[in-house]
Image: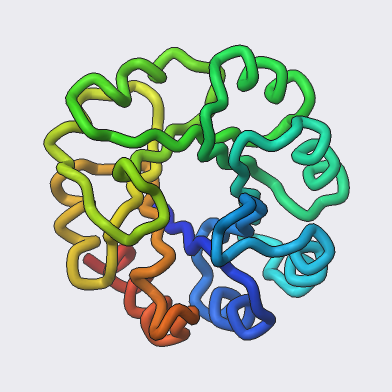
Amino acid sequence: MTKVKICGLSRAADIEAVNDAMPDYIGFVFAPNSRRQISPELAANLKSQLHPDIIAVGVFVDAPIAQIKALVQSGTIGAVQLHGTEDIQYLRRLAAEVNTPILKALAVTQKGDAQKWDQSPASHLLLDNAAGGTGQRFDWNLIGKLNKPYFLAGGLDAQNVTDAIKRVSPFAVDVSSGVETNGVKDHEKIRSFIRRVRNG
């Protein structure tokens, strides 16, 4: 069964929505310059309200490893997603410091982009378009064969997620703007998205 991640949660109402719909993962964005960025304090408060079976993923861009480690140790996040220019050495250092899944986000613009990271220390890849977080799809034909499990992101919504799963069989699908209305998480869109993933 394909897993689901709802990213960019920032309000108590968002937590209520996911506690009702029960995705496998949710995302707290700590990356600066993101409109969905939240503080560690707010993330900790939201996490305290989150159903214990849902894994909270922290989204970072070129963050100091100490910052990530602190959020893991506090229990605010249970997985790490890297969206910056983090290299193999950074991933090795991070993996030595945190005992959690590490997702490395990649911009897939041509064949072979994902394969370069197939042997990396990341536990999972996250495949997105060149400007992640825009809600725009990329060409799924560019993914190619991968041994490492991956999250598919970029332009997914309830209308196209079933086709995406049938075509590329990702480990998980990741959505943010596709379950929003006017930039705010929409409870019914979250429910509909997860229903489509699980029921086809």
* Location of residue 63 (image quadrant): top right
Rendered position, 110 above or below 79: above
What is the x, y in percent for residue 26? 56, 60
In the picture shown, does residue 160 fall above or below 71? below
Left or right of 29, for residue 111 = left
Q: Is residue 66 left or right of residue 6?
A: right
Image-based side of 36 in relation to 51, left or right: left
| Position of residue 102 measured from the top left corner of the image (x, y, whole percent) | 59, 33
| Colouring scheme, one of rainbow, by chain, secondary structure, one colour | rainbow
Numbered-mark total: 0
Give the x, y percent position of residue 194. Answer: 37, 70
- Residue at point 55% right, 66% down? 35
Quarter holding the C terminus is bottom left
Q: Residue at x 55, y 15 (%)?
A: 88
Looking at the image, which residue is at 39% across and 49% down? Answer: 132
Q: x%, y% of residue 127?
A: 35, 39
**Which picture quadrant has residue 73?**
top right
Q: Which of 98 and 68 is in front in this view?
A: 68
Q: Does residue 179 appear left or right of residue 68 in this picture?
A: left
Front residue of 33/7: it is 33
Where is 167 relative to 115, above or below?
below
Q: Which residue is drawn at 66% across and 53% down?
A: 30
